[in-house]
Amino acid sequence: MLSSILTVALFALGADTIEGIGPIGKIEKVQGGFGFTEGPAVDKAGNLFFSDIPNEKIQKVEDGKVSVFIEKSNHANGLMFDGKGRLVACEMDGQIVAHSPDGKTRTVLVDKNMGNRFNAPNDLVVANNGGIYFTDPGFRAPMPLPQGKTGVYYLSPEGKVSRLIDDLPNPNGVILSPDEKTLYVIPSGKADMMAYPIETHGKIGKGKVFCSLKQAAGKTNTGGDGLTIDIKGNLYITSGLGIQIFSSTGMHLGTIAFPEQPANCCFAGKDMKTFYVTARTGLYKVELPIAGHRFAGN
């Protein structure tokens, strides 16, 4: 149902659906009791990984079972696998790191820009060339901000870092279009999500408003958090209302509500049709008829 809010309870046997997107069946709670869940990521086998920020752990979901993958995560937030099978993490303690496939080796990829630590890296997306786009807002950052401002950065495969964007209020979620010709950034400080043309990886053109998030009653300018994208280029953005879904042209298709406010989301499973949502103290999942886009490490 277009432009509608779909409130889906745990006990629901089914739900109205957004045409071509779903959901199929009910939303299930995988597990609760976490501090604050974030950063879902999928490996090539379809297993899900996610962060529990305050408890400084990265969890793994395999065959429906949740186990600790990293014991000390340095407040890791956004996660994504790269083409080498490494789990790349935004550590809010100030750096971007890569964990080996077995989780035994941690490598710092970058921890400074212009001689200072990053504020608190939040979310990232790994391009097909191995470059990494990541956001650096002020959440959990020391004050005054080590970088002097919030920003979006690009880390090249050769290890060179450059600031691409510095005029957004707390840039948060970041993702690439399936053809990697557009960089999407959702700030927490305003309702508009931005889209930037990619001239070549590490060089972007002038940004424009891609879409504006629907607002809860009494709210006027609340932004989003994490986001993901499917094979058709539809964007799934977490917000105070739930997962707001927009087409590749910026049309609002609908919103799926969850029992807890979502912070981030990700497609996983062997067919990439299991939609996971990290929402405050819980991890939730629901089946969709459309598959998520596979990046280099997925």
Image (tube, grey):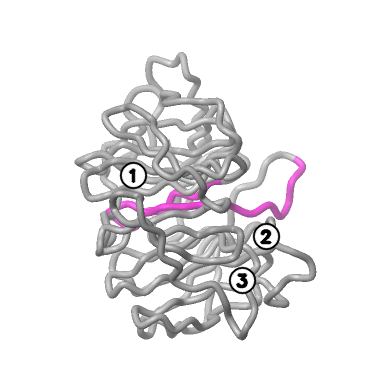
Quadrant assignment, res 80: bottom left
Q: Where is residue 158 in the image (x, y as percent from the top left)?
A: 35, 83
| 2 or 1: tag closer to the N-terminus | 2
Quadrant assignment, res 209: bottom right
Along the line of sight, which residue is nearer the eye, 157 or 21?
157
Q: Position of residue 192 (x, y in %)?
A: 60, 62
The answer to whether residue 192 shows anywhere in this view is no
Residue 137 part of the magenta segment: no
Region rendered in magenta: 218-238
The answer to whether residue 293 shows anywhere in this view is yes
Q: Position of residue 49 (x, y in %)?
A: 38, 43
* Label 3 neighbour load within 10 Å: few <14, some 14-19, many 20+: many
Q: Which mark is residue 190?
A: 2
Eyeballing the image, is 227 above or below 54? below
Label 2 element class: loop
Q: How far apart are marks 2 and 1 (CA)?
A: 26 Å
Amino acid on which disc 1 is placed: Phe
Eyeballing the image, is 162 above or below 213? below
Residue matched to label 1: 267
Q: In this view, does 150 lie to the left or right of 256?
A: right
Please tell me which residue is depicted at 68% across the width and 57% down the height of the picture. 139
Please tell me which residue is depicted at 29% across the width and 41% down the height of the picture. 47
| 2 or 3: tag closer to the N-terminus | 3
